[in-house]
Image (cartoon, rainbow, N blue to C red):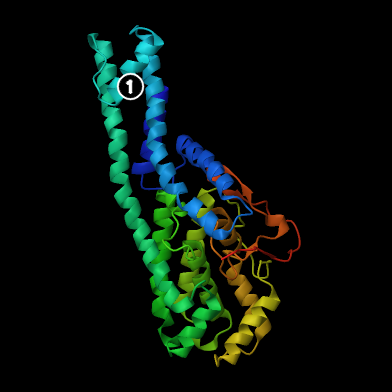
Amino acid sequence: MAVVAGTVLSAVRTVVLPRAAQSLITRTVFRNSARIFRLLAGEGRSYEWRDKVMALYAPITLVMLPGAWLALLALAYTAMFWAIGYGSVMSSFRAAGSSLLTLGVSALEGWSQSVLGFTAAALGLTMVALLITFLPSLYAAFSRREQQVTLLEVRAGSPPSAVEMLLRVHRIGWIDRLPQFWLQWEVWFADLEESHTSYPALAWFRSPRSDQSWVTAAGTVLDGAALCQSAVREAKSAAAALCLRAGYLALRRVAGFFGVTFDPNPQRGDQISITRAEFDEVLTQLREAGIELVDDLDTAWLDFAGWRVNYDTVLLALAELTIAPYAPWTSDRSAPDHLRPRLSRWGSVRFSPPTGGLSRPRRRSVRR
């Protein structure tokens, strides 16, 4: 009975409960499945191969999940049928399976057998029904997420880049329309936080195109907003600041659900994975394109790092976790040595707390 109760609670937490909630059964299924798929993907294989393999991870694991629930219920009801004297273990297993799958191949006699049979049949149908009703909600959230990710290619290119986004907006004279863009992504981040903590499997649903990812899209938009707030004179706005806050809060809460540790109160001047040389290189591109920058570039760097430090750790962790495609300043680097990700629960990554100086960012070799 305890196993039955735990299995039902796992299904409710995974499918019904509209908030982030851990489930031992669900976590175990996803974690073990992740080990298999990551082994098949292989660290040394091309990105195209790894993307094809990992694209099947979330869908196949979701199909396996009700199977795991039914298997646990079958074992639990086998034990209960055997305990009330139904017969041998094999006979009890046949009775449990017949009841759960509503096959009716085993006869039930007496109140105790009938009660077990009826409750098993109800739970078996419920598990299947939960998955069927769960999938439309899951794919609706996936569709909302991917619509904005796809639209970002128009402004930020492929792979998406914050500097390319600003250059394209400047070329068409839409700098003054950026506040509306930031507000749209503020809503996107809010939806991302709600959907990816309520339905954590969404984090592993990959984009229809192999060169797109919700993680790299989020990083591109946040870096673009941070550049506007710190260095681009004519692009500073309250909307960009709100988008940045909504973005790093969403990424933190998604990453926190998967066991990524981070400093919840970073300070201006703390180290990040972006170097000053990379920042100056981007500013040079913007200046050559005719974009007016602020006068004090030292302060601009501190301001940019002050924004980036809020999401730097979790962004790189999520890129590592989801095996995101190449994108500048997001999946083109690993965390510094003292923040190297480690595989943890739910197939997630866990960071050690900061202990020292910043290592040079490692460039991930990606074959496209």
Q: Position of residue 191 (x, y in %)?
A: 38, 60
Whether residue 114 sits left or right of residue 351 in the image: it is left
Can residue 1 be seen at all in this image of the molecule?
no
Judging depth in this view, the residue of 24 and 183 nearest the camera is: 24
Q: Is residue 155 above or below residue 337?
A: below
Name the residue located 23 percent from the left edge and 9 percent from the top edge. Answer: 109
**Which residue is situated farthest in the bottom direction here?**
290
Give the residue pinned by disc 1.
97
Q: Position of residue 198 (x, y in %)?
A: 40, 49
Q: Position of residue 1 (x, y in %)?
A: 38, 21
Number of other residues with Cα within 10 Å of mark 1, as a class: few under 14, some 14 to 19, many 20 or more: many
Q: Is residue 61 above or below residue 116?
A: below
Judging depth in this view, the residue of 342 and 195 nearest the camera is: 342
Judging depth in this view, the residue of 261 and 75 nearest the camera is: 75
Whether residue 72 sits left or right of residue 291 in the image: it is left
| Picture quadrant where residue 368 is located | bottom right
Name the residue located 36 percent from the left edge and 38 percent from the top edge. Answer: 12
Q: Secondary structure at mark 1?
A: helix
Report the number of numbered marks. Answer: 1
Q: Is residue 235 above or below residue 341?
A: below
